[in-house]
Image (cartoon, rainbow, N blue to C red):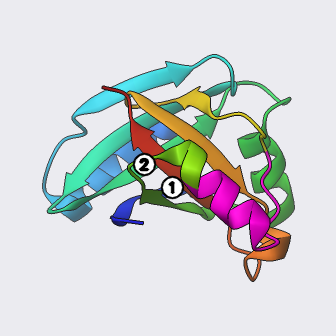
Amino acid sequence: MKKIEHIGIAVSNLEEANKLYSSLLNTKPYKQETVDSEGVVTSFFTCKDTKIELIQGIGENNSIAKFISKNGEGIHHIAFEVDDIIYEMKRLKKLGFKVINDVPKKGADNKLICFIHPKSTNYVLIELCQKIK
Ligand code: ZN
Protein backbone atom coordinates (compact mmCIF):
# COMPACT_ATOMS: atom_id res chain seq x y z
CA MET A 1 0.00 0.00 0.00
CA LYS A 2 1.37 3.36 -1.01
CA LYS A 3 -0.40 5.98 1.07
CA ILE A 4 -3.76 7.11 2.37
CA GLU A 5 -5.33 8.27 -0.88
CA HIS A 6 -8.39 9.78 0.73
CA ILE A 7 -10.72 9.72 3.71
CA GLY A 8 -14.40 9.28 2.90
CA ILE A 9 -16.95 11.20 4.97
CA ALA A 10 -20.65 10.38 4.83
CA VAL A 11 -22.81 13.51 4.71
CA SER A 12 -26.55 14.01 4.46
CA ASN A 13 -26.37 17.34 2.61
CA LEU A 14 -23.51 17.59 0.13
CA GLU A 15 -24.12 21.23 -0.70
CA GLU A 16 -23.88 22.28 2.96
CA ALA A 17 -20.92 19.99 3.55
CA ASN A 18 -19.12 21.42 0.50
CA LYS A 19 -19.45 24.91 1.98
CA LEU A 20 -18.25 23.77 5.37
CA TYR A 21 -15.24 21.85 4.05
CA SER A 22 -14.37 24.68 1.65
CA SER A 23 -14.10 26.96 4.69
CA LEU A 24 -12.29 24.38 6.77
CA LEU A 25 -9.69 23.46 4.15
CA ASN A 26 -9.61 26.91 2.53
CA THR A 27 -10.04 25.43 -0.94
CA LYS A 28 -12.89 24.50 -3.26
CA PRO A 29 -13.73 20.93 -4.22
CA TYR A 30 -11.88 20.06 -7.44
CA LYS A 31 -14.50 17.63 -8.59
CA GLN A 32 -18.09 16.57 -8.00
CA GLU A 33 -19.15 13.25 -9.42
CA THR A 34 -22.18 10.98 -9.37
CA VAL A 35 -21.38 7.28 -9.08
CA ASP A 36 -24.47 5.59 -10.50
CA SER A 37 -23.39 2.06 -9.56
CA GLU A 38 -23.24 3.09 -5.88
CA GLY A 39 -26.17 5.50 -5.87
CA VAL A 40 -24.05 8.29 -4.44
CA VAL A 41 -22.77 11.72 -5.30
CA THR A 42 -19.26 12.60 -4.18
CA SER A 43 -17.11 15.66 -4.00
CA PHE A 44 -13.32 15.76 -3.62
CA PHE A 45 -10.97 18.18 -1.91
CA THR A 46 -7.22 18.08 -2.10
CA CYS A 47 -5.41 18.35 1.21
CA LYS A 48 -1.71 18.32 0.41
CA ASP A 49 -0.83 14.71 -0.47
CA THR A 50 -4.22 13.27 0.31
CA LYS A 51 -7.89 14.01 -0.31
CA ILE A 52 -11.18 14.31 1.47
CA GLU A 53 -14.15 12.66 -0.24
CA LEU A 54 -17.60 13.83 0.85
CA ILE A 55 -20.30 11.31 -0.03
CA GLN A 56 -24.04 11.74 -0.06
CA GLY A 57 -26.48 8.97 -0.93
CA ILE A 58 -29.12 9.52 -3.60
CA GLY A 59 -32.47 8.50 -2.16
CA GLU A 60 -32.84 5.74 0.43
CA ASN A 61 -31.44 2.58 -1.07
CA ASN A 62 -27.68 3.06 -0.96
CA SER A 63 -24.84 2.32 1.43
CA ILE A 64 -24.43 5.94 2.56
CA ALA A 65 -28.10 6.44 3.50
CA LYS A 66 -27.95 3.14 5.41
CA PHE A 67 -24.68 4.15 7.09
CA ILE A 68 -26.10 7.52 8.20
CA SER A 69 -29.36 6.04 9.51
CA LYS A 70 -27.29 3.60 11.59
CA ASN A 71 -24.31 5.75 12.67
CA GLY A 72 -25.10 9.34 11.76
CA GLU A 73 -22.78 11.41 9.59
CA GLY A 74 -19.04 10.95 9.96
CA ILE A 75 -15.97 9.11 8.76
CA HIS A 76 -17.14 6.35 6.44
CA HIS A 77 -13.93 4.83 5.09
CA ILE A 78 -10.18 5.17 4.69
CA ALA A 79 -8.83 4.56 1.20
CA PHE A 80 -5.35 3.27 0.47
CA GLU A 81 -3.75 3.69 -2.91
CA VAL A 82 -2.32 0.52 -4.45
CA ASP A 83 -0.46 -0.15 -7.69
CA ASP A 84 -2.10 -3.49 -8.42
CA ILE A 85 -5.53 -3.93 -6.90
CA ILE A 86 -5.95 -7.54 -8.06
CA TYR A 87 -2.67 -8.49 -6.40
CA GLU A 88 -3.59 -6.70 -3.15
CA MET A 89 -7.06 -8.29 -3.07
CA LYS A 90 -5.53 -11.76 -3.48
CA ARG A 91 -2.88 -11.03 -0.88
CA LEU A 92 -5.42 -9.80 1.69
CA LYS A 93 -7.88 -12.64 1.02
CA LYS A 94 -5.10 -15.15 1.64
CA LEU A 95 -4.48 -13.46 4.99
CA GLY A 96 -8.15 -13.86 5.96
CA PHE A 97 -9.48 -10.37 5.25
CA LYS A 98 -13.04 -10.30 4.01
CA VAL A 99 -13.24 -8.57 0.64
CA ILE A 100 -16.71 -7.11 -0.03
CA ASN A 101 -16.59 -7.14 -3.85
CA ASP A 102 -14.70 -10.04 -5.44
CA VAL A 103 -14.01 -8.08 -8.62
CA PRO A 104 -12.73 -4.48 -8.51
CA LYS A 105 -15.36 -1.96 -9.54
CA LYS A 106 -15.23 1.47 -11.07
CA GLY A 107 -15.39 4.07 -8.31
CA ALA A 108 -15.32 7.86 -8.30
CA ASP A 109 -12.32 9.92 -9.42
CA ASN A 110 -11.12 7.51 -12.13
CA LYS A 111 -10.31 4.63 -9.80
CA LEU A 112 -10.76 0.90 -9.58
CA ILE A 113 -11.90 0.18 -6.06
CA CYS A 114 -12.55 -2.64 -3.65
CA PHE A 115 -13.80 -2.57 -0.06
CA ILE A 116 -12.59 -4.69 2.84
CA HIS A 117 -15.31 -5.63 5.32
CA PRO A 118 -15.03 -3.67 8.58
CA LYS A 119 -15.53 -6.88 10.58
CA SER A 120 -12.05 -7.93 9.51
CA THR A 121 -10.44 -4.50 10.09
CA ASN A 122 -11.42 -3.41 13.63
CA TYR A 123 -14.67 -1.95 12.31
CA VAL A 124 -13.08 0.49 9.89
CA LEU A 125 -14.24 0.21 6.31
CA ILE A 126 -11.11 0.08 4.15
CA GLU A 127 -11.08 0.93 0.45
CA LEU A 128 -8.31 -0.09 -1.90
CA CYS A 129 -8.01 2.10 -4.95
CA GLN A 130 -5.93 1.95 -8.07
CA LYS A 131 -5.69 4.73 -10.62
CA ILE A 132 -7.16 3.80 -14.00
CA LYS A 133 -4.42 4.52 -16.52
ZN1 ZN B 1 -13.58 6.50 -1.27
Between 15 and 1, the residue placed more toward the observer is 1
Q: Any atom of ligand 1 within 8 Å of the CB at mark 1?
A: yes
Q: Where does the image place residue 56, in percent across and percent down from the top left?
A: 59, 38
Q: Which amino acid, mark 1?
A: Gly
For residue 7, what is the image quadrant?
bottom left
For image coordinates 85% across by 29% down, the residue present is: 61
Q: Residue furthest bottom?
A: 122
Residue 8 relative to residue 4: left or right: right
89 over 49 or under it: above or below: above
Q: Position of residue 74 (x, y in %)?
A: 60, 65
On residue 53, which mark appears? 2
Q: Secondary structure at mark 1?
A: strand
Tell me whether circle 1 and circle 2 mark residues in contact (CB < 8 Å): yes
User: Height in image: 108 above or below 94?
Assistant: above
The type of residue carrying mark 2 is Glu
- For ligand 1, tell me if the residue under mark 2 lies within 8 Å: yes
Q: In the figure, residue 33 lies in which quadrant?
A: top left
**Per the image, is 53 magenta?**
no
Q: Which comes sooner in the sequence, label 1 or label 2?
A: 1
Q: Residue at x 51, y 34 (%)?
A: 112
Residue 8 got which mark? 1
Image coords of residue 58 (percent x, y)? 68, 25
What separation in Å lies between label 1 and label 2 (alpha carbons)? Answer: 5 Å
